[in-house]
Structures are given as C-alpha cells and as structure tokens.
Image: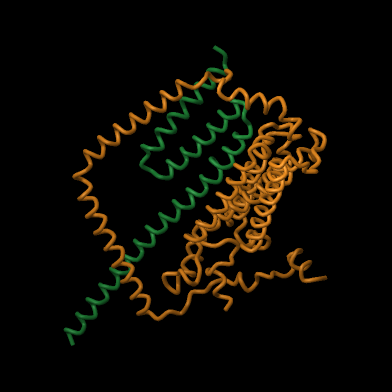
Chain colours: A green, B orange
Amino acid sequence: MEIREIFTILLLIILILCAIAVNFTKNLLSAVVIFMAYSLIMAIVWAMMRSPDLAITEAAVGAGVSGTLFLVTLKKVHLEDKIVSDLIEIDLDESEEETAEVGEGAQV
Amino acid sequence: MTSFEKWFYGETDVLNHAMDEAREPDSPDHARKERVKARLAEIRETEQYRERVENSRKEFRGLYLAVTAVGAIALIGVLLYVTACLPEYGAENPHTLEVITRYIEKGLEETGAVNIVSGIILDYRAFDTLGESHVLFTALICSMLLLRLDRKNMRSDHEDYYTVRTDKFFDLSADQIFRRVGAFLVPSIFIFGIYVVLNGQVSPGGGFSGGAILGAGLILFSASFGFEKVDRIFTRKVSSIITLCSLGFYSFAKGYVFFTGANGIENHIPKGTPGNILSGGMILPLDIAVGLVVGCTMFGFYSLFRRGSIGGNGAATGKSSK
C-alpha cells in the first residue's frame, strides 16, 4: 500500500470520527471546534481528490466563516445566561431590602 | 481638499455623529426595577413552560429513541446502497459521458477559460451561479429582518445601550497577540482573496471562494481592530450599493448572453488569449461580481450576529445622534 492511500484512509477515519463526535459532545464549544476540524479535514480530502476549487471554498466557509458565526452565537447565548443570573441576583437583593424596610416599620 | 478627500485620508469622519458613544440613559430607579421584574416574570414563565414540556416529553422518550434509531439506520442503509451503486472513483460514468466529453474537449475553445471548472460554473451553468448569488442575497435580507436592531423593533428604550454593552464583551482589540497576528494576517488574506477572485479563469478558485476569503479577512480585521475601523469604509449603504450593483450587473450580463445564445446571435464578447488574466469572456467580471456579493454577505452575517447592524448605522449608534 502506498503512503498516499494510508494517509487517505487515515483522513477518512478521522472524518467519520469527527462527524460522530460532534453529535455526542456535551460541551457546545468543543462541538464547534470539532466541526471546524471536520471542515479542515474535508478540505484536505477535496484537495487530494484534485478539486482545489472546492478545497478553498470548504476551508474558507466551513472552517472559517461558519465556525466564526457559531462561536459568536455561542458567546451571545452564554452572555444571555450570565445576564439572567445577574438579574436574579438583583431581584434577591431587592427582596431583602423590602423585608428590611418592613421590619423597620414594625419597630417604629 | 474636498470633503471626500478629507474623509478618504481619515482627517474627518462623516460618521462622527453616528459613531457617538451610546451613554446609559438616566432612567429612574423604579423604571429599572419594573423592567427587572417584568424580565424575571418572563424568565419564570419560560422555565415553568420548559418543565411542563420536559414532563410531557418523558413519556415519549422511549418511542422517540426507537423511531430515531430506526430512521437513522434506514437512512444509513439507503445512503450506503446508493454509494455502492455509483461508478468507481475515477472510472468513466456512462450516463454523463456525453456532457463530460463535450466540456473537456470543447470547454477551452468555447469559454476561453483554462480552468474548466470556472468555465462550467460561470459559462455553461451560469444560471445556477446566478441563483446561488441570489440565495446568498436573500439569506442576508432574512438575517437583517430577524437580527437588525431598529428603533421600531426594540423591546425597550434601553436595548440599544444593552447591545453596545454586550458587544464590548466580545471586544478582543485590546488583546496584543490578536492585534499583532491580525496586523500580519489581514493584508495577506486580502491579497490572497483578490488573487483568487481575479485568477478564477486560469487557476483554481473563483468568485465564491475568493469572496469567502475576502469576507473572512474583513471579519478578522473587525475582530482584531474593532468595528470602528471597518465602519470608516464599509457601511450598510456601501454594502447595499455593492451588492445591488454586482447582482444587477450579473443579471444583465448573463441575460444578454442567454438572449443572444438562445437566438443564435453573435454576442461580441472577446474571448481573449487562454491563460491570460483578461481571458474567458465574461468570466472575470462575473467572478468579481460574485466575489463582492459573497464578501459583503459574509461580513454582513458576522456584523448582524454580533451587534445587530451592518456598518454602525443601526439603532445602537444612530439613535444617540438625535
């Protein structure tokens, strides 16, 4: 077997592993990174199948732009979570203040 | 020195008004509390709703798993069967032999492009590429409809400030490593993208891939140096004009070629010497048009996702100028 064939088979195995791993990853950030790795390997496979046009597009769109969009969306989603938890903290503070005021009123 | 030159050399900024920092509005305390309470009520409602959905979903979980497994196995089987029916890689496919032979033998002569793939996608099958460009354009319009923050679709009066503040959370332009790497990478990415766009007819590449590279370069530029730098040259108006002109030019040029081709009239477009940059008839201008549309769309997506506007003309910064 030539080295080229072994390399191709190795790439295809990693490709399939990546495709399966994206589905079973709990951490969304890791899933995005694995997805980008998938696109990068796919670009190499396209280049080895002698279609460099597709390889360039796959590397730019799959590994570059769509990955960036996923990351931005992910950060926004986590940011929403953070803001929600902040709001809940504010709410707790306010309820404490209210009870304190009521307590003072009762003393007077 | 005209105002345009001043703007071009960066002495004045026509967007000065639009780029004013949005300040936190002086809202009374109780209004803020009201907002927090309303927001919390919303959150609780959605949480209760989620719990209810979860409970109802538990009953169907077993059935759902079984159906999913059966569906997935069936799909895998069908796909493997179809793949097994395909001719071997590199072997001749009798069903498409006629078209392939025509493309390979007469492609260079008929389109004038050394890169036959470019000849196919921008000459023989240019109608498909026209559709693709319009699909991208439609996608940009849809994300603008959904994501663009306008004064009319804000949930509260303070959402513009909220957007600007959350966008600060993404700001990496203070990061020295990122800045330095960006300073090296951005020019080379732009040059590579322009090369890929302009050499679509003689080497691998073309409008779509080159445009995607240009868009990625713009994204890296805005991420490493901040949106203010990009807003100097790339506003929503510029983006709209570029997209409109490119798509209009593409449609008219291809319409002309289709019209003459269908009626058997000479179309008077010089083919040029194969191998030169100025060859391939309409392929080079069409490549440039497609590249510009794709680049604008890619950066537009990123900008809309991050701050809800293209080029700082949205509500986030436009409102404070009033």
Which residue appears farthest toward the front when viewing the image?
B263
Q: Is residue B95 left or right of residue B281?
A: left
In the image, residue A28 lies at what x, y percent? 40, 45
In the image, residue A16 lies at what x, y percent? 44, 29
Q: Residue at x 38, y 37 (%)?
A: A23
- Residue B51 versus residue B111: which sits nearer the camera? B111
Q: Residue at x 74, y 30 (%)?
A: B108
Q: Residue at x 43, y 41 (%)?
A: A30
Looking at the rendering, in which quadrant would you find the C terminus of chain B?
bottom right
Q: Residue at x 45, y 72 (%)?
A: B158
Q: Is residue B106 left or right of residue A47?
A: right
- Residue B209 versus residue A5: which sits nearer the camera? B209
In the image, residue B129 lies at what x, y percent? 61, 43
Q: Is residue B304 left or right of residue A20?
A: right
Please tell me whether residue B148 is drawn above or below residue B214 in the rendered image: below
Task: Specify whether residue B191 is in view.
Answer: no
- Residue B252 versus residue A48: which sits nearer the camera? B252
- Residue B245 versus residue B276: which sits nearer the camera? B245
Looking at the rendering, in which quadrant would you find the N terminus of chain B?
bottom right
The answer to which image quadrant residue B132 occupies is top right
Which residue appears farthest toward the left when viewing the image?
A106
Task: Specify whether residue B13 is in view.
Answer: yes
Which residue appears farthest toward the bottom when viewing the image?
A108
Please tell me whether residue B284 is drawn above or below residue B104 in the rendered image: below
